[in-house]
Image (cartoon, rainbow, N blue to C red):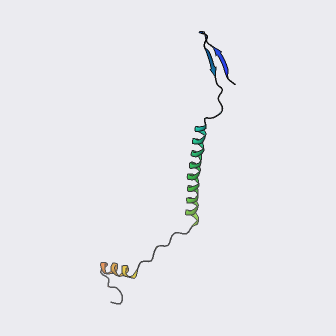
Amino acid sequence: MDESFSDAAGHVIRERATNGLNPGLVVLLFIGGLVLLFLVGNYALYTYAQRTLPPRKKKPVSKKKMKKERLRQGVSAPGE
């Protein structure tokens, strides 16, 4: 696969044929593809969940907090 040439001064120059892609580039492209696939998959799952799942229920407000809020607003709490 190596080709040999000689220049005007008589030096032998050898050219090596390339053996495909650089292995570092292959690893970089593979990892980049996995990261891109992960992000696209997460986005797809997020949009699917937003469309199909019901909205989250809010936590119930405790009676004590409701009583404090009513007192702040000037309305007497029932039973007092």
Q: Quadrant of the N terminus?
A: top right
Residue 59 image position (x, y, % from top left) = 45, 74
Q: Residue at x 61, y 37 (%)?
A: 23
Q: Is 17 displayed left or right of 49 in the figure?
A: right
Residue 4 image position (x, y, % from top left) = 66, 18
Q: Residue at x 64, y 29 (%)?
A: 18
Q: Is 73 displayed left or right of 8 in the figure?
A: left
Q: Is residue 76 above or below residue 21?
A: below
Q: Residue at x 63, y 20 (%)?
A: 14
Q: Quadrant of residue 25?
A: top right
Residue 80 image position (x, y, % from top left) = 32, 89
Q: Quadrant of residue 21?
A: top right
Q: Is residue 43 above or below residue 12?
A: below
Residue 56 image position (x, y, % from top left) = 51, 70
Q: Is 2 displayed left or right of 51 in the figure?
A: right
Q: Residue at x 56, y 56 (%)?
A: 42
Q: Is residue 50 above or below residue 9?
A: below
